[in-house]
Amino acid sequence: QVQLVESGGGLVAAGGSLRLSCAASGSLFRANTMGWYRQTPGEQRELVASITYSGSTDYADSVKGRFTISRDNAKNTVYLQMNSLKPEDTAIYSCYAKILSADYWGQGTQVTVSS
């Protein structure tokens, strides 16, 4: 049974930084694409960043230049370094992993940026 365990959310002042981590376990197969979505109440879920097994990345325009996604394939772990945080980055951040043809999700972690 595949599990994704996130850590690193919290409360930070505007301009500050946070680093999210997400470790995938329970699969015999590697995760092809891993990434992060975020969602606020009443809004659609937004893809924040994604990274392939080979390291190709993609970012939402709203976070380009501020967020960096990376992964450790040996640990099946994906990271999201978030710098220059803004109040509008406040959301629940959820990691996902695509393994074979299935998508798996973490439980979500709250990120709150105070103004």
Image: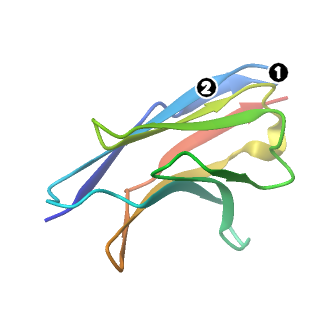
Q: Considering the image in quadrants, where does the C terminus appear?
A: top right
Q: Whole-Å distance between the Cαs marked 1 and 2?
A: 10 Å
Whole-percent x and y of residue 10?
Answer: 55, 30
In the picture, measured across the screen, residue 45 lies left or right of residue 24, that is right
In the picture, measured across the screen, residue 59 lies left or right of residue 109, that is right
Name the residue at 82% across, 38% down: 87
Q: Above or below — where is 1 with respect to 113?
A: below
Q: Secondary structure at mark 2?
A: strand
Name the residue at 61% across, 25% down: 18
Q: Quadrant of residue 22?
A: top left
In the picture, measured across the screen, residue 2 lies left or right of residue 8, that is left
Q: Which mark is residue 15?
A: 1
**Which residue is nearer to you in this view: 40 or 30?**
30
Which colour scheme appears in the figure?
Answer: rainbow
Q: Amino acid at mark 1?
A: Gly
**Which residue is nearer to you in this view: 5 or 97?**
97
Q: Quadrant of residue 46?
A: bottom right
Whole-percent x and y of residue 53?
Answer: 45, 52
Q: Above or below — where is 109 with respect to 45?
A: above
Q: Amino acid at mark 2?
A: Leu
Q: Considering the image in quadrants, where does the N terminus appear?
A: bottom left
Whole-percent x and y of residue 29?
Answer: 21, 61
Whole-percent x and y of residue 83?
Answer: 74, 25
Residue 41 appearing in the image: yes
Name the residue at 72% across, 72% down: 42
| Dot 2 crowding, Cα within 10 Å, few <14, some 14–19, many 20+ | some
Identify the residue position indicated by label 2 in the image.
18
Q: Quadrant of residue 114?
A: top right
Name the residue at 38% across, 56% down: 107
Residue 40 appearing in the image: no
Spot the residue most to the bottom: 101
Q: Which mark is residue 111?
A: none
